[in-house]
Image (cartoon, rainbow, N blue to C red):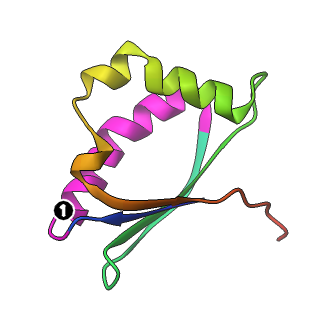
Amino acid sequence: MRTYTVREGLLDEWVQRWREEIVPLRLRFGFTLGHAWIDRERNQFIWTISYEGEQSFEERNREYWNCPERAAMSLDPKDYLEATDKQEVARVY
């Protein structure tokens, strides 16, 4: 689960770019995206991601970040995000 605190005034733009650019590429790399939520009061974007392939999540994630398609996005998270929190969680229900 990932929780991002988005810079003031950029939440809607971040969500749009995430949907249009990040989601399709993540799916092409075999990731499963669960739900995504926004908390406007805290200016946060929360989402879940998993990977169940032959590689570890970390290996596949590294390939995603290093691929030419990701570099071509010209989407630097630092331009949008003030803070990130990544938690590994397990579903119990």
Amino acid carrying label 1: it is: Leu
Q: How many marks?
A: 1
Magenta segment includes 65: no
The residue positioned 50% from the left and 25% from the top of the image is 64
- In the orientation shown, which residue stands out farthest toward the top? 68
Instruction: Tell whether position 14 is magenta.
Output: yes
Q: Answer above or below: position of 89 versus 77.
A: below
- Give the residues in magenta: 8-31
Q: Position of residue 67 (x, y in %)?
A: 43, 17
Relative height, residue 29 to residue 87 (above, below): above
* Quadrant position of the N terminus in the picture: bottom right
Q: Quadrant of residue 56?
A: top right
Residue at the spot of label 1? 10
Nearer to me, 28 or 90: 90
Would you say 64 lies left or right of 1 here? left
Front residue (pair 41, 5) = 5
86 in relation to 77, above or below? below
Q: Residue at x 43, y 29 (%)?
A: 25
Percent x, y for residue 24?
A: 42, 33
Question: Predominant secondary structure in magenta?
Answer: helix
Residue 63 screen position, x and y as percent: 55, 20
Please, what secondary structure does the residue beneath circle 1 have? loop
Extreme-left residue of the structure: 9
Quadrant that contains the C terminus = bottom right
3 vs 35, nearest the viewer:
3
Hey, which residue is sitting farthest bottom in the picture?
Answer: 41
**Which class describes the residues within 10 Å of circle 1: few (<14), some (14-19), or many (20+)?**
few
Q: Position of residue 3 (x, y in %)?
A: 49, 64
In the displayed structure image, the side of residue 83 where residue 29 appears, left or right: right
Picture residue at 32% right of the left edge, 85% below the top: 41
